[in-house]
């Protein structure tokens, strides 16, 4: 890591996987001046992609990029790199993540942290061998101000007895059957989880953080489009699940309550909708990125009225910014906040973070693997399965 005696600790990053999310992270680094009062900053110094043209975009757009590679092991051998952001297909997670961890470089990786539970276990074993390496998982939606407000209410135990929880991540990018097939539609690259592996940790991040680990699950998994254009004039079979609805029973603090989790690639009318709803005997609340400025709440006293209150949430993020409270918070802002949380924990340690909400952990990702593995078993057996 760079000299911590400087006014702002510079963390030198390498990016492995220069696709859509890699570019989003590059954009967040370029916007670091948007943050106020932080004592750390990322600097992207090296990138790697099997496609040289993808890496060339970074070299052309980011003045600090000194090295581009097609072999990630060459990047890991670069002594001027402190930490890695890695966004590659799920089947590549196990080997690349383990190699990153074994190299001693800190890792912010994409979900689901392994193509299946066995791969995830081996990544966790590498972490245990290298406890000095900080490893976190990308999950940006809980950094929306509305989601942060709900997390605050949960911490304050506002809800009383929990009646029911619902959380989901829906979009409609695959509604068009003419969309060409990609790696997310193939078991060999995406894994059997399908939409659960690709979207599920986003949905589970807050429930896991609250200690709401599902105890059992009945899964309803859907394959809606069974083939897509293969890009060569033919059609290729779609092997993975489009949509998933997981009906779970959850136990926490002596309470048992249902929790419905859903991940959908084919949800008509939803461009990129993440939401959480919590119903309780004393308080209920919900937030959706469909209406990113609003959070709804319903306080209740026995015999009192039952009225939802919809309030505009000001732009009050985990880390201070130059943006005024009257403006809207968006996806690029949530990525910036998440990356700040990773850099904060790396620079100041968990106990010394400038604010308390840290990135999704590999242990939380492991909890998602336990659920998704049970969900596949539930779909095959058509019955309720205990999550182990």
Image: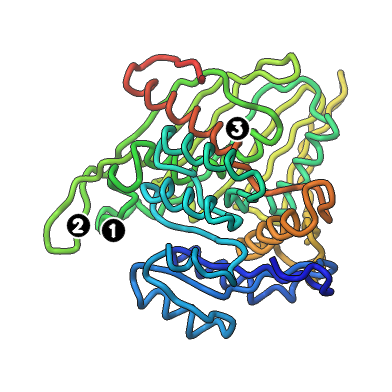
Query: Secondary structure beneath disc 1?
Result: loop
Which residue is denoted by mark 3 in the rendering? 166
Question: As displayed, is residue 349 above or below residue 58?
Answer: above
Viewer-nearest residue: 218 or 52 = 52
Residue visible at 53% across and 81% down in the picture: 66
Query: Secondary structure beneath disc 3?
Result: strand
Between the C-alphas of marks 3 and 2, the distance is 35 Å
Callouts 3 and 2 close, C-beta under 8 Å: no
In the displayed structure image, the side of residue 73 where residue 355 appears, left or right: right
Residue 343 in picture, x, y percent from top left: 70, 60
Residue visible at 19% across and 63% down in the picture: 231
First in sequence: mark 3 vs mark 2 = 3
Question: As displayed, is residue 5 above or below residue 169?
Answer: below
Q: Quadrant of the N terminus?
A: bottom right
Which residue is denoted by mark 2 in the rendering? 229
Between the C-alphas of marks 1 and 3, the distance is 30 Å
Residue 8 in picture, x, y percent from top left: 80, 72
Residue visible at 42% across and 64% down in the picture: 72
Question: As displayed, is residue 227 above or below residue 122?
Answer: below
Which residue is denoted by mark 1 in the rendering? 179
Query: Secondary structure beneath disc 2?
Result: strand
First in sequence: mark 1 vs mark 3 = 3
Residue 339 in picture, x, y percent from top left: 66, 60
Residue 310 in picture, x, y percent from top left: 76, 46
Between the C-alphas of marks 1 and 2, the distance is 7 Å
Callouts 1 and 2 close, C-beta under 8 Å: yes
Viewer-nearest residue: 92 or 318 = 92
Viewer-nearest residue: 295 or 373 = 373
First in sequence: mark 1 vs mark 2 = 1
Number of marks present in the image shown: 3
How packed mark 1 is, by other alpha carbons closer than 10 Å (few <14, some 14-19, many 20 or more), is some
| Numbered label attached to residue 375 | none
């Amino acid at each position: 890591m760079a000299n911590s005696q400087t006014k702002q600790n510079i963390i030198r990053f390498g990016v492995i996987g220069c696709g859509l999310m890699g570019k989003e992270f590059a954009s967040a680094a370029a916007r670091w001046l948007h943050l106020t009062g932080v004592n750390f900053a990322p600097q992207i110094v090296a990138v790697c992609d099997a496609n040289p043209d993808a890496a060339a975009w970074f070299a052309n757009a980011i003045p600090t990029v000194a090295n581009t590679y097609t072999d990630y092991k060459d990047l890991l051998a670069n002594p001027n790199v402190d930490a890695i952001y890695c966004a590659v297909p799920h089947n590549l997670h196990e080997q690349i993540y383990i190699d990153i961890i074994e190299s001693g470089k800190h890792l912010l990786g994409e979900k689901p942290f392994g193509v299946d539970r066995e791969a995830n276990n081996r990544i966790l074993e590498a972490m245990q061998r290298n406890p000095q390496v900080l490893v976190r998982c990308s999950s940006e939606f809980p950094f929306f101000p509305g989601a942060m407000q709900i997390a605050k209410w949960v911490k304050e135990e506002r809800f009383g007895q929990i009646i029911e929880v619902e959380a989901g991540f829906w979009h409609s990018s695959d509604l068009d059957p003419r969309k060409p097939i990609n790696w997310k539609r193939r078991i060999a690259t995406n894994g059997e989880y399908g939409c659960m592996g690709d979207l599920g940790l986003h949905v589970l991040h807050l429930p896991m953080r609250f200690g709401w680990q599902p105890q059992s699950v009945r899964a309803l998994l859907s394959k809606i489009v069974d083939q897509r254009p293969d890009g060569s004039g033919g059609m290729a079979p779609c092997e993975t699940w489009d949509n998933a609805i997981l009906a779970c029973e959850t136990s926490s603090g002596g309470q048992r309550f249902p929790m419905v989790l859903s991940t959908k690639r084919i949800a008509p009318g939803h461009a990129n909708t993440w939401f959480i709803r919590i119903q309780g005997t004393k308080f209920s609340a919900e937030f959706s990125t469909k209406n990113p400025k609003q959070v709804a709440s319903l306080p209740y006293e026995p015999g009192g009225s039952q009225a939802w209150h919809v309030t505009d949430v000001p732009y009050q993020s985990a880390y201070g910014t130059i943006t005024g409270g009257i403006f809207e918070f968006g996806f690029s802002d949530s990525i910036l906040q998440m990356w700040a949380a990773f850099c904060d924990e790396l620079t100041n340690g968990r106990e010394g973070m400038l604010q308390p909400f840290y990135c999704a952990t590999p242990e939380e990702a492991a909890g998602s693997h336990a659920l998704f593995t049970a969900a596949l078993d539930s779909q095959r057996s058509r019955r309720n399965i205990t999550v182990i």
